[in-house]
Image (cartoon, rainbow, N blue to C red):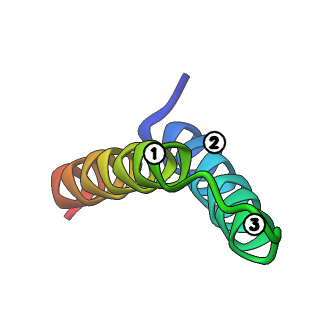
Amino acid sequence: MTIEARIRELGNRHRTLDQTIQKEMTRPSVDTLQVRELKQRKLRLKEEIASLEARTH
């Protein structure tokens, strides 16, 4: 898999996590522990994307 393809894949996963987080936040009984875990996963993806993008420049 090329770096560009990996970046696209990670970007898709990042967007999906963002949508999941937004959906969780609208629920009447928000599971803050789950939301925190989702946000941490999203941040790790963002960091990995930034690292890969730095390699392409």
In terms of depth relative to the viewer, which is nearer, 6 or 15?
15
Compared to 18, does 56 lie above or below? above
Compared to 1, does 40 lie above or below? below
Q: Which residue corresponds to mark 2?
A: 9
Q: Earlier in the sequence, mark 2 or mark 1?
A: 2
Disc number lying in front (1 or 3): 1
Q: Secondary structure at mark 3?
A: helix
Q: Which residue corresponds to mark 1?
A: 33
Q: Residue at x 36, y 58 (%)?
A: 46
Q: CA distance from mark 1 to mark 3?
A: 17 Å
Res. 54 image quadrant: bottom left
Q: Residue at x 52, y 37 (%)?
A: 6
Question: What's under tag 2, amino acid-wise?
Answer: Glu
Percent x, y of residue 21 = 65, 63
Estimate how packed mark 1 is, as few (under 14), some (14 to 19) or many (20 or more) residues with alpha carbons within 10 Å.
few
Q: Which residue corresponds to mark 3?
A: 19
In terms of depth relative to the viewer, which is nearer, 23 or 15?
23
Compared to 54, does 27 lie above or below? below
Question: What's under tag 1, amino acid-wise?
Answer: Leu
Q: Earlier in the sequence, mark 1 or mark 3?
A: 3
Percent x, y of residue 56 = 26, 55
Res. 24 image quadrant: bottom right
State yes or no: discs 2 and 3 in contact (Cβ < 8 Å).
no
Q: Earlier in the sequence, mark 2 or mark 3?
A: 2
Q: Residue at x 73, y 55 (%)?
A: 16
Res. 44 image quadrant: top left
